[in-house]
Image (spheres, rainbow, N blue to C red):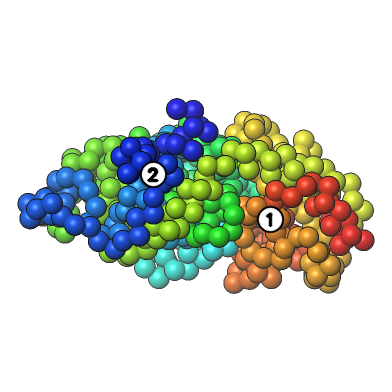
Amino acid sequence: MKFDTIAVQGAHSAKDNRHCIPVPIYQTTAFDFDNVQYAADLFDLKTEGDIYTRISNPTTAVLEQRLAMLEGGVGALCLSSGQAASSVAVLNIAKAGDEIVASSTLYGGTFNLLGVTLKKLGIKTVFIDSENPEDYEKAITPRTRCIFTETVGNPKLNVADIEGLAKAAHRNGIPLIVDNTVPSPYLFRPFEYGADIVIHSMTKYISGHGNSMGGAVIDSGKFDWAASGKFSELTEPDESYHGLSYTETFKEAAYIVKARVQLLRDLGNCISPFNAYLTLLGLETLSLRMQRVSDTALKVAKYLEKHPCIEWVNYPGLESGKYYPLAQKYLPKGASSIVAFGLKGGKAAGVRFIEKCKLLIHATNIGDSRSIITYPSLTTHRQLNEEQMKACGIGDDFMRLSVGLEDAEDIIEDLNCALS
């Protein structure tokens, strides 16, 4: 199957689901066991099947399989939010005393997760204020367990050199974890450039309609956890499963299986079957939406570039932009929906501009079918101090526009009226 066919029909057969053409909603907490031995085998991970929706569910399973197919991985795990996906992706391989090397330009919530919350758990994050893979590699120590970055930084819109970062990680026996939320697998597939784990906030582009929370972790199956020698939690016996070794039992799927049967089992941050169903509906139109918003965002960026009230514009698809060469390499079909720009006049002008927008919705989401304007220094990055905001590329003049599916001329007219 090609991409669009997978998005619409992948991993689902109507004949196997009482001839139901859309994926049914299995709105249940638990599942009936055929017999006692079957139940015991499920709990011992000796056979596949559903026990409890906190761990797995047939509706969610279709979404997970489709995402794995679209990204080109061996398996996926869907969770309650993108933040839950980031947490599980890291905690699956890092513990107290370990370290992470991460981009300083991460989404504000992820920055706080790595820099504050995980710090309380004894996991240190070294943030790199550079786009050079060599600087990431210099920060790696024997305690480092992964490099963590976003394909396209939110909201700075810097494009990461995924291939270079993957090589730096692999030279040191650690995986590269990539948040691929902004491009989605339609615009970019990180595994093709050496990434090992991909995460998504499905709340954004994959769902696409601003009505469902969800996150996903997807495993390439290509990283050799045993050969690395740094991941005993995957190679050594797990006492909660009678001494089972994930790498020995599940081979290339060791990482994603452990994330499900250990972390999801214990933390309980599962996605509901209904949210999985809504996300599947959004996923069916992913390629159509991503191409449309990418095309519209480029038009909007070109308009803003010429406006006298605008100090600067950053959109990876602009030929004049710093990240255009990397965007041409990694994002040839389009650079997604987010346009970042700076208003002349600083905070006072920013507040007036936001309040004058009529069509653009003032909110903190991205990837919605509706256009959303965000003032990051007063919202998404509000908890960061001045130095941290500067590292993320955020200032009082910074605006983030997530272009929706409205007519491009209407979006531009609303911007023009607000700026005027």
Q: Quadrant of residue 169?
A: top left
Q: Is residue 402 left or right of residue 356?
A: left
Going by the picture, which residue comes out furthest to the left?
A: 37
- Residues 105 and 302: in front is 302
Q: Nearer the viewer, mark 1 or mark 2?
A: 2
- Residue 130 image point, x, y percent: 60, 48
SS category of the residue bearing label 2: loop
Residue 387 visible in the picture: no
Q: Which residue is mark 1?
A: 370
User: 10 Å neighbourhood of mark 1: few (<14), some, or many (≥20)?
Assistant: some
160 and 23: which one is in front?
23
Q: Which residue is mark 2?
A: 20
Q: Which mark is residue 310?
A: none
Q: Position of residue 44 (x, y in %)?
A: 13, 52
Please tell me whether residue 142 is drawn above or below residue 111 in the rendered image.
Answer: above
- The relative height of residue 290 versus residue 144 in the rendered view (above or below) is above
Q: Residue at x 71, y 55 (%)?
A: 371
Point out residue 161 in the picture as x, y percentages from the top left corner.
57, 38
- Rendered position, 112 above or below 199: below
* Res 363 seen here: yes
Location of the C terminus (image quadrant): bottom right
**Position of the N terminus by quadrant:** top left
CA separation, marks 1 and 2?
A: 31 Å
Mark 1 lies on a secondary structure that is: loop
User: Is residue 261 or residue 342 the one in the foreground?
Assistant: 261
Q: Position of residue 393 (x, y in %)?
A: 68, 57
View extreme (top): residue: 1
Q: Residues within 10 Å of mark 2 (few under 14, many from 20)?
A: few
Q: Left or right of 185: which side holds 73?
A: left
Residue located 70% across and 59% down the image: 372
